[in-house]
Amino acid sequence: MARYRAWEDVVELSEEKEYPLKIIKLSREVATLQIRSSPPGAVVYVDGIQRGKTPVSVELPFGDHRIRGEIHGHYPQEASVRLQESTPPPVNLKFPAIENVFLQLDSKPSEAEVYVDGKRLGRTPLRVEIPRTTHRLRLTLSRHKDWEGSIDLSELEEKSLFCMVVDLKTGWSYAYECNS
């Protein structure tokens, strides 16, 4: 039977008589794993499949598994577990917060709509505080070709100021750490 531990025993039959049957409790090769996080509410993936939000209990077959948790505003976390018993110790994921930096955007001509990771943040010139990670930018302005690009802010110091100028007529962009 799938997901049950194999059992076997030897019964010696030496003479013609009734032999009592043993009642055997089959043990499942499945573990119930508790996954918690700090802060709670992280989306949990086990072996690449979404299994819910923390705190969550998942039933998994014995063996090795990869746990990944994601929560907005925090760095994703991963853990490996080897399940060999039905009630293993819980997995506790601790999510460090992503520090913010300041992004200052300008465009030529100005008044372009600014989208960061698909979310409209305003018009240029614009100064916003955003997480210190990689972001997808899009600037749009009527009668001009949209400008799209990505920006990696992960190497900046916390609360740094990163400046970017985009020329919507030519598609030219210039980005630099300005810190002032």
Image: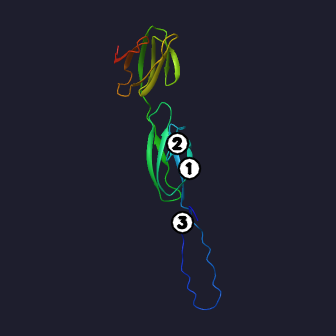
Q: Amino acid at mark 3?
A: Arg
Q: Amino acid at mark 2?
A: Val
Q: Amino acid at mark 1?
A: Val
Horizontally, residue 61 falls left or right of residue 127, namely right
Residue 174 lies in what quarter of the image? top left
Residue 161 lies in what quarter of the image? top left
Q: Where does residue 152 sit, x and y in percent of width and height?
A: 39, 26
Q: Which residue is mark 1?
A: 58
Q: Residue at x 54, y 66 (%)?
A: 5
Image quadrant for the C terminus? top left
Mark pair 2, 3: CA separation = 28 Å
Q: Which residue is mark 3?
A: 5
Horizontally, residue 152 falls left or right of residue 4, namely left
The disc placed on residue 101 is none
Of the image marks 2 and 3, the number of the one nearer the N terminus:
3
* Residue occupying the far bottom of the picture: 15
Please tell me whether residue 48 is drawn above or below residue 171 in the rendered image: below
